[in-house]
Amino acid sequence: MRIGVVSDTHNNLRNVARIVELFNAAGVERVIHTGDITQAKTLHAFRSLEAPLAGVFGNNDQERRPLEAACAELGFFFVDPPLRLHLADREIVVVHDPLDLDGLAVEPGALLLHGHTHRTTREWQQGGQLAFNPGECAGMMPGLNTIGVVDAVQLDVELLKF
């Protein structure tokens, strides 16, 4: 199962349009947003995704009523962190701030997704878990924005830069 991972879009609608194109071209089966969407119009920009979208709210997602209304209208699933999913026989834990992973009980081999730092990271934990932050997509510098495609079975990560 291929999962698209995006973080920290911060209302950059041009970049969200490109993200949708990239995920659709990559044939991902799910897309997970690790927070900091900022405004409901950003969620509307994700409506052309060919895969279900789920995620968590970040510290900059303060316009909650409009965000929650957009999720309900578009069929997206967002919650306060942590979001726990079970896909491809693997636990997937989604938070915004990586510090929220501290002290969480997670299965060996789990996929831990976060954002917040705006830095791409791939770190293997002692229990065989992979902690991954795709970086950020709010920047205006072409070539420095990143999203990830994770093979949930193999825990392989492909970064897509744009």
Image (cartoon, rainbow, N blue to C red):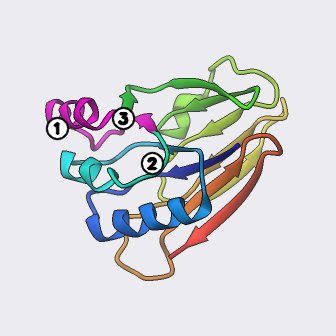
Task: Please give the name of the residue rendered at 45% of the width and 48% of the height, measured from the top-left corner.
Answer: 116
Q: Nearer the viewer, residue 29 or 108?
A: 29
Work out whether mark 2 precedes mark 1 in sequence or the reverse, and give the earlier one. Answer: 1
- Measured as percent of width and height from the top left, residue 37 is found at 31, 48
x 80%, y 40%: residue: 153
Q: Disc 2 marks which amino acid?
A: His
Name the residue carrying label 1.
63
Q: Say left or right for 108 vs 9.
A: right
Q: Which badge, 3 or 2, comes first in the chain's sequence?
A: 3
Question: Of label 1 and label 3, which has the lower sequence position?
Answer: 1
Q: CA distance from mark 2 to mark 1?
A: 17 Å
Query: In the rendered structure, which segment of residues is drawn in magenta?
Result: 53-75
Crowd tier of the residue under label 2, counting other residues whose Cα lies within 10 Å: few below 14, some 14–19, many 20 or above: many
Residue drawn 50% across and 81% down?
Answer: 143
Residue at point 83% right, 45% down? Answer: 154
Assign a secondary structure to mark 1.
Answer: loop
For the residues labelled 3 and 2, the Cα–Cα distance comes to: 21 Å
Number of on-image labels:
3
The residue pinned by badge 3 equals: 76
Q: Is residue 55 magenta?
A: yes
